[in-house]
Image (cartoon, rainbow, N blue to C red):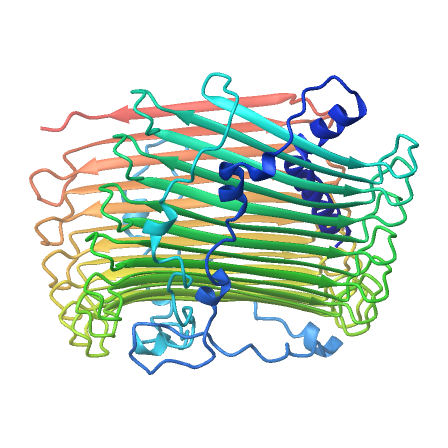
Amino acid sequence: MEANRNRLRLGIAIAAVALLGLAAVGTTSLLFPGTERTRGVASDPGYAAVMAYAGPGTDVAESTRSTDVEPARGHAYVAVEATPGDAPEADVSAAELGTLPEEPAAAGDSDVTPNPAPEDGAPSIEDWQDLMLESSAPFGDASREMPDAGAGTVGAVVGWFAPPTDARAPEGARDVGELLAPPTLGRETRDGNCSVRESIEPRDADGDGNPEYVRYRSLRACVQDADGDGVPEYALWIARDVELWDNDSSGTFNAIEGVQGVREIADPNGDGAIEYLAQAKWTLSARDDDEDGNPEYVLLTFVGEQGLDANANGVAEFYRAASLRMERVDASSNGFPESAAVDGNVYQAADEGDDGTREYEGVLRIEASTADGDDDGHNETTFVAVRGYERVDRDLDGTPEAERGILLDVEVLDATSNGFPESATMRLVAFAAIDETDDGRPEWVRAAQITGNATDRDDDGAPELQTLTVRAVEILDADQDDVPEFLAVLVGETQAVDADSTGIAELATVTVRAGARADADEDGLFEKEAYVALDGLRADAVEDGFPEEVRLALRAYERADANEDGVPEMERALAADAYAIDANSNGAVEDANLTVRAAARTDADSDGTYEAAAFFVLWASSSDADDDGNPEHESLKAYAYAYKDEDENGVREEQFGLRLLAERTDANSNGVFEVVDAEYAAVHVHDVDQDGMQDCGAWKVVAYHAEDLDEDGTWDVEDLTIRAHREACP
């Protein structure tokens, strides 16, 4: 939190410099006579009008408050879920850590092995066709179950998000016409289109040249009146009122109270009716009683409004109001604030019909605070809350046709104030909905919720449990019968367990499940569907930073069945498994393996006979039997086969096969590979007349062999062979 605290100090310093920029100029003119000074700025009507602005009639925050009352089911709003319960305790025994998922079986280790090409002949497509790699196709590997996010229908999403109770403009801010009245210009000395007036009121009771009090006032006015009719097309006023105190007359000011007001208007057609207005006021209050450079108290506030009335009919088409309060207390003046807080609010609205109603409204509220009760530089509590919401209600019936929102809560607790939080939680919710029928029940909704927790029960800075959970849904239910025409769900969780709190997690896991379905006619038969599953594990029971086991498994499946007869016109599937084993946990992996299987097939007429299909298998492995970090053997094998049988007569008009084999050997495990072999073979054939005999084809074989007999890192023997053949098709 020290970094945050430094940023807070810097932000206040910048704000103070911006506000008091001209105050410094005024003080200079006091200390160095001869600089022009003009008294009476406070009596200028322009100055008085700008400084009189006090912001929206009521606290902008009132328009952004959230309700604690959950709306009825089926309402367009989606309410906030209750705060998640306490995170599960991280009691994981060594035995439990040793229970790991079974190693996935290698896909087709013996079944899928196309014959290698003869050394003295050409590769044959039959080497692939006989096996076709179909036995390894992962069509049945992926689960067809939709993950459960607790939101299978639009109505079930209720509980994820709650909009503010009342998204209205602050009281007193609706009558924008009053705000658009220009102030009377006071006396001014022009410099082009701008003039600056200043007044300085010093008091130096003991006459030592160090004033105990200085008040500085200024007004900068910029007016553009191109046609010279006395009605400006544009005007800007900036007023400042700054008071400085040096009660001990030491020459260092130790207290400041400052106000800056700004008013901007635009009347492009110069008819006296203001089309645009922006008005704002900043205040700064700071005290440094002991003059050590660490103020004991700083308060910065801002209020402002904007209004646009393009046709100057007194009804604003767009309006925005904002407020901000930043406060910092460092009573001990040691540079560690006992408390700091930020409270910001924004409201905006649009009137599409320019009739005094507001079809669009949006609000944003930000709250943040920290507390350091024992003043040691470690905050016991840190809290951040953000609420944002927008809605469109064109018929103004109170039921928005479109809405979206965001919610963020962060809380960090360090009860012992030692710099190591015992708990930290985060929750983020994003939400959007469309209600085209305007009946209070959205036909489409999209929502996501992310929660994170970290628990450090023994308060040593090493959390015993860290978790991150994701839930996301998208639902389309156009006829509102609770049977979605489209449904997509994502559920994921990752966690790290460090039961003995050493700072090294004994177990880390990640689990993701996702699915999407389309059922346009809502008969329970899906025209399209897709599913993904991802599982990962990292185990380090020895807790030395070298995991004994790492595993990752991925499954994906997609199908299309437009006529809903249960026979998909298209299917695609993917399965990938990877693992690395370091049984003695010395950082040298004894066994590593990657297996990838993929397949796709097409049955356009849905008769159970495929017009086209493709299959792919890959294995990669590395073994280090003596566990010295130098693998004795590494290999890669990849096979692919594809065909077309467009007339579905069992005679394939076109076929393609590919094989890649590579391996290298370091028999004495000294880090220098003595032998490397690689072979690439590909064949493409056509049966144009469909007689079962190949009419034409092409093939290519590339073979490479290298040996390093003296193991000096330079190949002593290298051999590259390339053979290819192509036939013209009739």
The answer to whether residue 104 is visible is: no
Q: Position of residue 452 (x, y in %)?
A: 59, 66
In the displayed structure image, the side of residue 725 where residue 702 appears, left or right: right
In the displayed structure image, the side of residue 304 where residue 224 appears, left or right: left
Residue sitting at x 31%, y 46%: 641
Q: Quadrant of residue 150?
A: bottom left
The answer to whether residue 241 is visible is: yes
Quadrant of the rendering where the N terminus is positioned = bottom right
Quadrant of the rendering where the C terminus is positioned = top left
Residue sitting at x 79%, y 54%: 586
In the displayed structure image, the side of residue 407 where residue 601 appears, left or right: left
Q: Position of residue 395 (x, y in %)?
A: 19, 64
Q: Position of residue 481 (x, y in %)?
A: 19, 79
Q: Position of residue 153 (x, y in %)?
A: 30, 76
Closer-to-camera residue (564/348): 348
Residue sitting at x 38%, y 42%: 277
Q: Is residue 592 above or below residue 667?
A: below
Q: Quadrant of residue 506?
A: bottom right
Q: How many marks?
A: 0
Closer-to-camera residue (349/453): 349
Q: Quadrant of residue 658?
A: top left
Closer-to-camera residue (347/276): 276
Residue sitting at x 37%, y 73%: 78
In the displayed structure image, the side of residue 370 where residue 142 appears, left or right: left
